[in-house]
Image (tube, rainbow, N blue to C red):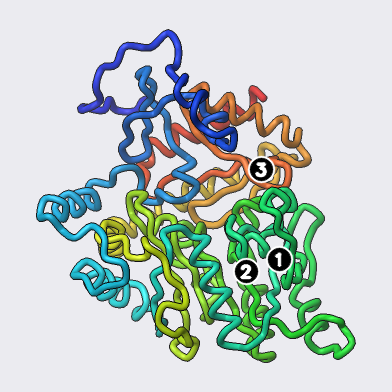
Amino acid sequence: MTLAADPVAPVIPRASAIDIAVFEDLESEVRSYCRKFPAVFHRAVGADLFSEDGRRYIDFFCGAGSLNYGHNNATIKAKVQEYLAADGIMHGLDMYTAAKREFLHTFNDVVLRPRGLDYKVQFCGPTGTDAVEAALKVARKATGRRGIFAFTGAYHGMSRGSLAATGSLRARRAGGVGPGEVTFIPFEDGPAGTFDSVGLIERYLNDPSSGVEKPAAVIVEPMQMEGGVYPASREWLRSLREVTERHGVLLIVDEIQSGCGRTGRFFCFEHAGIVPDIVTLSKSLGGIGLPISLTLFKRGLDVWEPGEHTGTFRGNQLGFVAATAAIELWQCTKFRTDLAVAVRRLERFGTELAQTHPEITTRGRGMALGLDLGAAGGAERADRVQRHAFEHGLIVELCGRDDEVIKLLPPVNIDIARLDRGIDILRAALRSA
């Protein structure tokens, strides 16, 4: 399938070598994505990334889930440009601003109220990990309890509190963080198979000799992404909600990567019909990659004193503008219809792949699909697939315990021609590898 030429793409002569000397000289060894995708990118639109040597790449990575609406979404970008041209305030801490007011009205009218969600909104530092930090802190303050239940395979961030609730031993060791007051429970599904984790939580809470104190909260991703793309079943999430309510334990749902439409609905937890006590949001909330994060909680949990959780950049004004424009897309019938079409197409690919390659396990929901090669060549094959895809114009990320899972995160509003083209490249990469 041939993609239409981009009418505004500049003609760039191919470079004989990638100019990366300054990165190698000055940037820390901690960098990772540039090692997997060795190109100097300079332009992007929709699902396309362009490198300095003139190559076009289809993006099924989307900034680790920060660009659900694609690169430089025209509608969102126009609102940002308009705000900049009008000399809109750029930094406001937590002061009242027109941009914040517009965001709150839109978020309440389009996202919260139609779903029957009566949450207070806390603006956190600009990244998702601070939203998790705030969620854990407010849960502990509201309940007077210290403990947290988290799940194996979980990823909640890289700052100290969120890292303690993250399953990766490698990440925690690098940060010098132990589990502390966090008790890890096997997730509903994982590399070792399914597990009755809700039953285990119930047993801990019912047994006065379990050795485990009642926690302040249980924190869960409704679909584990970094852990290997494991969507929690609707029944499991409902059972978890019932157990936490019965025992007076708060339920924190981390929607940082699974939210903002990634699963076909604005929140992933909507599929289960539950109402969490606390929700964290970030990544694609900023519309075109602008940093912004929120912690949402039921009104009775707003126990903060002024300034108890603060941060210089908790009021990203451009983030408010872009987020407002992105949320308004959900009122557009065409946007919702196109999203539903793309979801069906990606799901059909997953089904087809499972039939033609039974050794590959496919998992996901909506516009998130994981191809688990654990029993089909493992991490080495996944790495070869990723490299072959990149060499042929497709960017995909790896995840899972050993990077054995290929994670597909196309823009939720990707046109079907580009979606099919990316799928074709991936099919060829799987055959080649």
Identity of the residue furthest to the left in this view: 86
Residue on which the image places disc 1: 151
In the image, residue 426 sits, relative to residue 236, either above or below, namely: above
Please name the residue shown 64% across and 26% down the image. Answer: 431
**Apparent side of residue 109 relative to residue 371 in the rendered image (left or right):** left
In the image, which disc is placed on residue 405?
Answer: 3
Q: Nearer the viewer, residue 328 or 17?
A: 17
**Apparent side of residue 387 relative to residue 66 in the rendered image (left or right):** right
Please name the residue shown 47% across and 91% down the image. Answer: 300
Q: From mark 2 to mark 3, how far is it between C-alphas?
A: 20 Å
Quadrant in the rendering for residue 18: top left
Q: Which amino acid does label 2 sit on?
A: Val
Q: From mark 1 to mark 2, how far is it between C-alphas?
A: 7 Å
Question: Residue 326: horizontal and vertical position, in percent?
Answer: 30, 58
Please name the residue shown 49% across and 67% down the image. Answer: 131
Q: Nearer the viewer, residue 399 or 97?
A: 97
Q: Which of 106 and 262 is in front in this view?
A: 106
